Every structure is written in structure tokens, then in C-alpha cells.
Amino acid sequence: MLVRQLALRDFRNYREADVSLEPGPNLFVGSNGQGKTNLVEALGYLSTLGSHRVSTDQALIRQDQPSAVIRARLQHEGREKLVEVELNRVGANRAQVNRSVVKTRELPRYFSSVLFAPEDLALVRGDPSGRRRFLDQLLVLRAPRLSGVLADYERVLKQRNSLLKSARATGAKAASLTTLDIWDERLVALGSEIIAARSRLLAELAPHVRSGYAAVAGADHGPTLVASLSVLGADPDEDEQQGMAPADTMTPEDLTNPAAIATRYSAALQRLRRRELDRGITLAGPHRDDVVFALNGLPAKGYASHGESWSFALALKLASAEILRRESASGDPVLILDDVFAELDESRRIRLADAIADYEQVLITAAVYGDVPEGLRAHTVRIAAGSIVDEAADG
């Protein structure tokens, strides 16, 4: 998969932008705040329907404008597709592929990318929500239909929480809440599918994370990924998931079996019902789960050094790209490295450059040209004040 051209209208600080891209490495260089990250953020949006920097689309639309447009010309095996999305302040977003209208949620079917940015350090050091989002975005890239399952789960969860809050306010007895049982069935069915899909993904990621970590760090610190599931008793409110495993366990086979998970899930909801009624929220399910990342047997969150945390986060993204490239019929995902090299020492820069050398296309942003290894400067685009000021091949 290659991006041959990217065009923007009223996106972030760009009134208009049109840039051609080449196979292999493409380097966007510009001082901080000039707009280089905005270019790769736009491409990331096409594959994830979200930004790695903000939680709403409104911030992506240029100030005082009603809409923004992202348009990309993609190429695979000599065949091209024109993919575009219009982000609107009022009303639904709209999408097209080859000028034919498609549902916006279908865009990830046509373009796959993996983006790594400084914000991704939070995968290791931040809250469980970031790790859940990382897994779910990768799940959708692999199987776009899961976006519907995740959306349905969120709707059922919202309805169930509303019922719990209403019951708390009116002092309803648990035995009288027959409606809650109906929502429980739907929650368990959808949630068990999500938990099983995440568990399969973690098992597939693990060996690639280990090899990716060794490639970037130059050492094998035994990185591991272990699910911490609320349906088995893990409680992020009590231990902040610093490696504390729940007392209950499941076999690896059962962790990928929705039926086996559903049995534990139903039991957990029954066990927690009184607490849920007291608090007015659902206390078990994929929305409460976490993943414990560990190095040398210790949780990376709280124990890993800054360099180790960076290496682990990079390894997670390299592992994601490796899984996608093995499965995709449209070639490698486009690998995006946003302001990454400034955070790495010289040895890690060189090892990262070697690790990504064989990807079909890599997009890199940097404030300082010299931070990027020479082999990744083949096609350099210079950015200033929301404009493309120079495109040059540096041989």
C-alpha cells in the first residue's frame, strides 16, 4: 500500500495543501508548530477515524470553517483508489471512494496505517483506557466488522448504566430489576466477543513485541503482555493494575473462547450486582479491562526507565505493523513515525531505521533534519506556517 498524493482543505492550520509522496521513506521537516504533524495526522485519521492527539473531530477543522477535507490517492500493485472524507462541524461526516459515496466507518477497509508518536508513551505509563483503545483500533484494522461490535457494546453499556443509576435513585430492589437481566444478556454476548478478540490479539502480538523490542533496544528484557480482566476479579479502582493479577484465572484456550468467557462474565455480573446498584455503574466487562506490560518480570508501568518505556511502546507499534502486513491483501500498512527520532539516542535511531527499512512506505516527521538517519532522508518535504515550501530528493 502506498500513498501517492495527499491533499487537504481547511484541515488544522492548512487552508490548502497538496503533497506528492514516494515509495520508501518520506521525511517531513519543519520547526515545531508549522504543520508537519498535521499531515500525518490526516492520514492516520483515514485508517482509524480518529486523531492520535485529540478526542473530537472539531479540533481538526480550521478555525472559523464549517468543514475540512482529507483526500488521499492510494496505490497497490499499479491500481489506484481515491479516498476522501469530509469532516463537518454540523451534521455527519461524509466519505467517498473513487467519487462514490461510502459509509464513513468503511474507510479503514481501504487504507491501513500504523502511527507512532510521543503520545504513545502513555501506552506504557498511562491509564488503562489508552491500552484498550490501542487494542481496539488494531482489531478494527484487522477486522472492520468489529467496529460495529464495539459500538453496539458501548450503546448497551450506556443503557445498562442508565438503568443502574435510575435504580439507585429510586431505591429499587435488585430482585425487581428484571429489565437489568435483559441488558445483561446483550452485554455479555457482545463483551465476551470483544474480550476473546483482544485475547487472541495479545497472543499474536507477544512474539512480535519481543522481537521488536530487541530490535530497537538492542537487548532482550523479556517483554510480556498479560490481560487483566475485570470479569475475573481485577479491579483498576483498587490496585491501578500495577501487575496485580486477579485471583481467578482462565486457560489460554478459554480466554479466546467467547462461550467460556460468557460463563465467567455472567457470574461476575451476578456477584457484583449489589455494588453496581450502589454505585450506578457497570463494574465488569471489556470497558474495565487492562493489559499489564512487563519487562524482566516487573510491570513496565512504574518500573521501566524512560528509554525502556520508549522501546516498549515502539515495539508495540512495530508488532502491530508486522501483524497487519502478514494479513493484508493490499500490502504493508503505511508506517508513520511522528517526531520519534528526537526522543531516541543515536544507537536506538540506527536500530529503528534498520527495523523499518523494508516497509513499502514510511512517513517521518522531524523538527531537526539531522535527527533522522541518512538512509531515511531520500524524499524530504519542508513545511513552514501551514505550507509546503520545498520538496526535494536528497541523495
Image: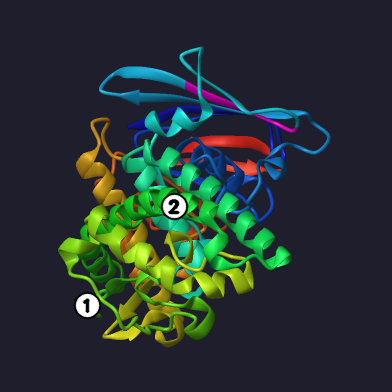
Residue 291, image x, y percentages:
37, 70
**Is 100 within the magenta?**
no
Q: Is residue 207 above or below residue 116?
A: below
Residue 319 is labelled as: none
Looking at the picture, tell me which residue is in the foreground, 167 or 329. 167
Residue 155, image x, y percentages:
55, 45
- The residue labelled by disc 1 is 220
At 66% from the left edge and 46% from the top edge, which residue is drawn? 56
At 79% from the left edge and 31% from the top edge, which residue is drawn? 65
At 25% from the left edge and 43% from the top edge, which residue is drawn? 325
- The residue labelled by disc 2 is 187
Say which amino acid is labelled 1: Asp
| Range drawn in magenta | 83-89
Looking at the magenta stretch, what is its main secondary structure?
Answer: strand
Residue 97, image x, y percentages:
46, 18
Mark 2, mark 1: which one is toward the viewer? Answer: 2
* Number of numbered labels in the structure image: 2
CA neighbours of label 2 inside 10 A, class few (<14), some (14 to 19), many (20+): many
**Is 86 within the magenta?**
yes
Residue 230, image x, y percentages:
41, 70
